[in-house]
Image (spheres, rainbow, N blue to C red):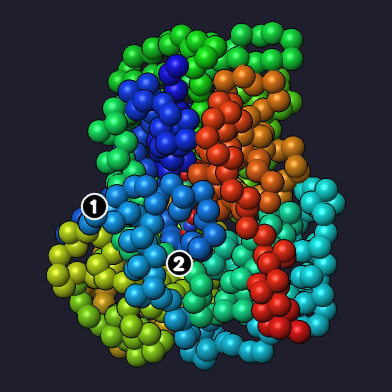
């Protein structure tokens, strides 16, 4: 039996590991086809200290990433192979927890923090009502349909939108899932004390050790290999993959897939269409259609394969696009000023959101070093624009058309670091990264818009990642990708344990009580 995995992101790598660990496959019978030149998918690391690092993604995890940590308990850490990636992760977070003292700043530099996170009684009732509304009643509904307009100006919303990513026009169904799944975070949302992060950037902390564990087990990694199509044997009521066509270095190969083989396909990517700019250039817009081409083909004329058009397409850009930026600096001015402003040492402060910036700028100062091999004296920080289509307040351009220097200047002027501006600009390289479809996971959807990890009638096809439908789980997480992989393999091969249940705060008395105390 052979396993073919389409997509070499965290989900594809996790699938290969579960096939070995849970289903007893030999690594030599597993091949991963990755369209990009490197493994990692959305979790990438590029650049250098001299040219400026590029880290497209953020790092927000919690202790209930059950499938992920189950897997990472087996994978040795790259830094210290005597311990697992999971143990390294929890040891780091116990040693250096977030203790965010200044999460929301207004235009006058005042910290915004109030009882009940500024929620009115009506807002709190609306939150409870949404959490109790069955998903069946939330098809296509938007968050803004469930709350009063003032809700979106509260501290609660600013914390939620910047930690989790939703916009007012995002899916109410997904918001409901987030409230139940992340209920334990609620009382300490502003300090982020239960939010966890990787000890290094996500590529080095997660992708490198996973690939290093799979490689000696004989797993084939075919990078630069784009899977164009999958063929099926049509039998009434059943679909069985019998062919996989991929392009590699200009050649097309058509593989025969036996009925006992399995094919696991990553549908789409939050990093689709990613493009990178520089200090002097804005990222060039890209469409990134390749990441969902295969899904579109699979969904054509089949009702059980979801609806990729709900999540991907230029028409959605105002709702799905983010710009993130990574700043590499050799000066100390920015870090000194931020430590003085926030009272937090680098790495402990969590997110700082500049609430009156039209781009809704949020920055975070990493624990140093963020990248293994980062030279002494070089420091990294990161940020994102939740509304990159809007015009800046100091730089009168839309955020997605700005160079790294322009984004950095906008941040510094909002922070009122005008006196240090020249010194910081001179010692910093800011690299912007345009991510047109990050928030595709938050698009309003119906329950049928994402296919199940094993579509009805499929005998040897599983679907992975953010765009397969799992009950209860929240999509903007690696846990979602890991869980779809585990679920698909378990359903198709009926080997090994079933995935653990998704954590649900509404059934956890201590989480529920703490949340109610905060709200009431
Ligand atoms: C800005 C940002 C911030 C994030 N922050 C967090 C966070 O804080 N916490 C968290 O848990 N998660 C976060 N995520 C989400 C996390 O990155 C994803 O959950 C995870 O990387 C998804 O893994 P995946 O393998 O399912 O998909 P991806 O990582 O998207 O990988 C899919 C891969 O499939 C490949 N592919 C697609 N189609 C084909 C084809 N036809 N042939 C061959 N290859 C193909 C693509 O090239 C891609 O490499 C963030 C994502 C982004 C973009």
Label 2 C-beta lies within 8 Å of the nearest ligand 1 atom? no
Image quarter of the C terminus: bottom right
Residue at left 37%, top 21%? 29
**Residue at 51 percent of width and 72 percent of height:** 194
| Residue in the image at 52% along x and 35% along y | 496
| Nearer-N-terminus badge (2/1) | 1
Could you tell me residue 332's position as x and y percent? 22, 80
**Which quadrant of the structure image shows residue 172?**
bottom right
Q: Tell me residue 69's x, y (percent).
A: 45, 53
Mark 2 element type: loop
Q: Is residue 19 left or right of residue 222?
A: right
Residue 136 lies, with reference to residue 262, above or below; the image says below
Residue at which label 1 appears: 81
Secondary structure at badge 1 equals: loop
Neighbours of disc 1 within 10 Å: few (<14), some (14-19), many (20+): few
Callout 2: few (<14), some (14-19), or many (20+) C-alpha neighbours within 10 Å?
Answer: many
Q: Are marks 2 and 1 in contact (CB under 8 Å)?
A: no
Residue assigned mark 2 = 196
């Amino acid at each position: 039996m052979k396993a073919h995995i389409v997509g070499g992101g965290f989900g594809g790598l996790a699938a290969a590991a579960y096939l070995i660990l849970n289903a007893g496959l030999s690594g030599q019978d597993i091949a991963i086809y990755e369209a990009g030149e490197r493994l990692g998918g959305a979790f990438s690391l590029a650049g250098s200290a001299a040219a400026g690092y590029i880290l497209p993604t953020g790092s927000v995890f919690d202790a209930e990433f059950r499938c992920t940590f189950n897997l990472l308990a087996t994978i040795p850490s790259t830094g210290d192979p005597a311990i697992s990636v999971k143990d390294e992760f929890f040891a780091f977070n116990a040693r250096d927890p977030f203790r965010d003292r200044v999460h929301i700043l207004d235009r006058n530099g005042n910290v915004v923090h109030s009882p009940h996170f500024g929620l009115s009684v009506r807002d709190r009732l609306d939150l409870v009502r949404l959490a109790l509304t069955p998903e069946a009643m939330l098809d296509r509904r938007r968050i803004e349909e469930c709350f009063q307009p003032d809700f979106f100006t509260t501290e609660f919303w600013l914390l939620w939108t910047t930690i989790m990513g939703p916009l007012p026009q995002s899916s109410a169904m997904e918001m409901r899932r987030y409230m139940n799944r992340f209920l334990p975070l609620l009382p300490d949302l502003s300090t982020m004390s239960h939010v966890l992060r990787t000890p290094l950037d996500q590529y080095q902390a997660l992708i490198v050790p996973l690939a290093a564990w799979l490689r000696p087990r004989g797993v084939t990694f075919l990078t630069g290999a784009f899977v164009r199509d999958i063929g099926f044997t049509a039998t009434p009521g059943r679909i069985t993959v019998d062919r996989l066509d991929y392009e590699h270095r200009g050649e097309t190969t058509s593989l025969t897939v036996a009925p006992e083989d399995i094919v696991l396909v990553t549908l789409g990517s939050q990093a689709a269409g990613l493009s990178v700019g520089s200090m002097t250039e804005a990222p060039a817009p890209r469409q990134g259609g390749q990441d969902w081409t295969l899904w579109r083909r699979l969904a054509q004329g089949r009702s059980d394969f979801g609806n990729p058009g709900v999540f991907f397409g230029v028409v959605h850009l105002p709702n799905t696009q983010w710009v993130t930026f990574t700043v590499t600096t050799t000066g100390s001015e920015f870090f000194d000023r931020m430590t003085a402003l926030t009272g937090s040492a680098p790495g402990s402060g969590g997110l700082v959101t500049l609430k009156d910036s039209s781009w809704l700028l949020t920055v975070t100062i990493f624990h140093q070093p963020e990248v293994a091999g980062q030279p002494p004296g070089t420091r990294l920080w990161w940020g994102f624009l939740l509304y990159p289509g809007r015009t800046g307040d100091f730089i009168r351009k839309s955020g997605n058309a700005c160079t790294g220097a322009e984004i950095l200047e906008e941040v510094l002027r909002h922070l009122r670091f005008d006196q240090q501006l020249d010194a910081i600009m001179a010692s910093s390289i800011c690299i912007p990264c345009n991510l047109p479809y990050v928030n595709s996971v938050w698009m309003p959807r119906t329950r049928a818009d994402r296919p199940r990890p094993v579509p009805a009638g499929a005998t040897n096809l599983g679907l992975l990642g953010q765009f397969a439908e799992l009950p209860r789980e929240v999509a903007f997480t690696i846990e979602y990708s890991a869980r779809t992989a585990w679920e698909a393999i378990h359903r198709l091969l009926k080997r090994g344990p079933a995935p653990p249940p998704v954590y649900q705060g509404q059934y956890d008395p201590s989480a529920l009580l703490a949340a109610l105390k905060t709200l009431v």
